[in-house]
Image (tube, helix red, strand yellow):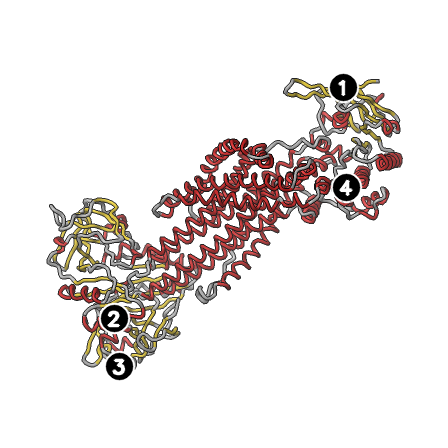
Amino acid sequence: MPTHPEKVSAIVSAQGLGKQVETAAGQLVILEDIHLDIAAGESVAIVGASGSGKSTLLGLLAGLDQASSGRIRLAGEWLDALDEDGRARLRGEQVGFVFQSFQLLPSLSALENVMLPLELAGHRDASTPAAALLERVGLGARLDHYPKQLSGGEQQRVAIARAFVMQPKVLFADEPTGNLDAATGQRIIELLFSLNAEQGTTLILVTHDDQLAGRCQRAVRLDAGRIVP
Amino acid sequence: MSLAELRLAWRMLLRDWRAGELRILMLALIIAVTATTAIGFFSDRLQRAMVEQSAELLGGDLLLQSPREILPEWQARAAELNLAEAQVLEFPSVVLHGEALQLAGVKAVDARYPLRGQLRVALSPYGEEIRETRIPSVEEAWVEVRLLTLLGMEIGDWLELGETRLQVTRVLTFEPSAGGGFFAMAPRVMVNQQVLAAANVLQPGSRISHNYLFAGEDRALQAFQDWLRPQLEPSHRLLDIREGQPTVGAALERAEQYLGLASLVAVLLAGVAIAMGARRYADRHFDTTAVMRCLGAGQRRIMALYLPQLLWLGLIGSGIGVALAWLAQFVLFWLLGDLLPTNIPAAGWLPLWIGMASGLTVLAGFALPPVLRLRQVPALRVLRRELSPMPLRGWLVYGAALLALALLMWRYTGSALLTATVMGGAALALLILGSLAAGLLQLSRLMHRGVGVAWRYGLNNLWRRPLLSISQILAFGLTFMAMALIVLVRGDLIDSWQTQLPPETPNHFVVNILPEQRDAFAALLDQRAIAHSELYPLVRGRLAEVAGEPLGNRIQPGDEGAGAVYREMNLTWTDTLPAHNRITAGQWWPTGGPTDDVMVVSMEDRLAERLGVRLGDVLTFSFGAEQRQVRVTSLRSVQWDSFQPNFFMIFPEQALAGQPSTYMTSFYLPLERKGELTTMLRQFPSITIVDLDRLMEQVRSILGQVTLAVEFVLLFVLLAGFAVLYAALQASLDERLHEGALLRTLGASRRQLRSAHLAEFGLLGGLAGLMAAIGAELIAWLLYTRVFDLAYHWQWPMWLWLPGLGALLIGLVGYLATAQVLRHSPLAVLRRL
């Protein structure tokens, strides 16, 4: 694995990243020539208009999708050197996710949703840390509730607890407040940032909300698939 | 797969169950297993009962008839195999009462007789029948009622047999191991074997039939038969319960085939339901799987979590199904207690294991492909919900299902031909029906212009997803087809049995009618309005040579059927081909006899096959010292279970000219007119009347049971069919709820939605019904002509009622199932999904 001393501190690094898809109308360029280094513990907002390629970039950086060109290093490993199962392992060990649509499993209770990553990693006692984290996000009394019995804000808090329960090095958040009203969104943001500070996690979030972007240490602006200053 | 993974998979299964995700899959599986296993248990027990009844007719599980005592080592071998054995001696002897004497068939039994079944007797002529648990003592003789008539005796009178005197104490009404066929003409006297020495009736050279009855475990019986058969001589006859009673054997065989076919259909239907349930399960787990992949689960891990779930689901569902099936057969036998024999043997363990194996096989064949698809769910789906795994390859889905079905079908029917016919028919039908469904769907677009907006929306639902619609039309079409087939085949099979035994089936055979009595006897029957068959002449003769070879060369050792022709046969002459006979090769002679060579014969085709006789071969018959040669000019198939006089060999009159003959016939006399038999015997003392009612009763009761079983099985097939309907509707319910909610948000009225659903489901059901009619016609034709050997006729009413019923049923069920769409508030539905 090649290492570059000057970039050792970068926990996420993209070099010459591009993504094209074939459509009926010909090749569509979604991302082009993206260079990006994000240091451990940094919080970065990826902003831009709808269709600018924000979510695609997030998916690539998190190893959910494969780039057409360029390379990505995540938590010390080159993603292109890993197969899908290798990337899944890396995600399980190092990465947490928060999604706009929460992505809670409807058949699992709040507690079980948070337990799931621990269980997948083979932890013997998954319920203690999961319950503790749910307590921390203010849902200690609702451990046995199912997602459909929870409000949007509560569901997102469960999702945040699930994202932090593995103490990930990097947390990817895709429009985490996109489905919530302003007040609830604000509380979710506070929660996200305070947990982030407690655990020293690197936070990469996609948003079109400038106010939310302003809370991050740095904003990367995308326009038509390219980073603009 | 680690222990931790297994534990996690188990927890995930429990969570899914609690959340209601598994109900359809589980329900379909339980129905599949319950249906097939209940059928398995039921037919297992019925079969045991029928076999026991047949054994009752035979008096044991196995009967060996021999002209002399058998080798001691044969008996030793039977004892070694733990087979019970009883000996019965049969011989003709004259019995006397005062001045009157009569040739009787004596049956001397030992204390172990009968090994199976019970003797039934009456204490007075035509009196109430009772079960007798002992055999006659050394001072008793039990006789058939006609012997009383012939000798002018009453119960309590004394009878002389050789040098002993025996008191007649019972009238025999049913004796296991009646033996000798219908032509045991002499009236029966049953005595204890111990009286024979004192009676001194058996001289060296006496014509005695030594009958050895054996009973025991199936495996031991089989081993004994396998060991014995190669050592048998042509004069030996070895009968097991199937061969012993050809009528029962044929009915049993058809019933088994039918039950096998029906359980297969139930499996097919439940399989479709399982496939639908599994698809919905997999679809609803796409998101879950994508999230799990985000959380670090690789493909192998995903499978390590889902496959054990499927296995546990299979074990639990099959377990419940087997348990329910066990209860179901109990309830059924309890309900039918009055109709069935009192002691139905308990079911074996085999159906249980087969049920479990069937459940797992069906699940693997129908549910595995959709679940395997979960392996392909991309992690990126968490960001882009429209990303679904690649659709399944057709060959994988159908291949797995077909393999599972073929395996099960083969197991149930035990018949490669039946399996191949049904599978071939189904595959062909699937192909044809698939393209037909597509064509019909296309055609139905013509309706588009003439209907209102609600109907158009409903019909659009069908056209929008042609593949889904075609698969649903096929699924329902197959369900209807299966049900139609079951109804059709059931009706025709039962009809064919009942037409075989019409209400006035002859219940008496008369033999020993002298030629000079012939016309008078026929006149008597006609005068008393007793329905009877023709009077056939009987000539006794022996087949000596076939195409110049001694008969012995043509008979395989141990071929009891052919061995029967070794003895003297009953030959007859007539110019009219008897009813229930069909010429299969050659030509029947014209009335008045053949025009050129009169020395010809018409031979029963199966016997001809056994002896290797072809058309044109010359047969030599011996009549005492005289020999006659005849040429085979036709082969006939004979319906042996018609209860009409049937013959292996029929000649033109000229070919048997000059041979002494007597006449025989069969007639029907209802129970309440039995007394007329006595009058008949008084008027014609020399004739012998054989009462068939007892035997017929047995046959009827067996057919009755078979019919009942068939109806019971139909119930399960219907149940499986409804499981399919339910699973299919559940599978598309989420989407419908969502769309319905959206439409209502956009201002659609309840009435409009209702019409839309009715239009959609009605058309779906109608098209499925049409498919079903086409498929059922095709498969029924194959089954009738290739498997059941029944005449086929065009089933036109089906073409009307199937589409109508389909539209009505699917329309109604679809309407009811989607009522939820109207019941819930749109907001609640939209938020829930």
Q: Which mark is residue B158?
A: 3
Give the residue at x 53% y 34%. Answer: B395
Quarter that holds the C terminus of chain B: top right
Which of pointers 4 and 1 indicates the residue nearer the eye?
A: 1
Query: Which chain letter goes with mark 4?
Result: A
Query: Which chain letter goes with mark 1?
Result: A
| Same-chain status of marks 2 and 4 | no
Q: Earlier in the sequence, mark 3 or mark 2?
A: 3
Q: What amino acid type is highlighted by mark number 4?
A: Leu
Label 1 belongs to which residue?
A: A224
Between the residue at mark 3 and the residue at mark 4, the CA separation in whole angstroms equals: 97 Å
Q: Is residue B474 left or right of residue A41?
A: left
Percent across and percent down for residue A47 are 81, 24
Question: Secondary structure beneath disc 3?
Answer: strand
Percent across and percent down for residue B138 are 32, 79
Mark 3 Cα shell of 10 Å, populated few (<14), some (14-19), many (≥20) = some
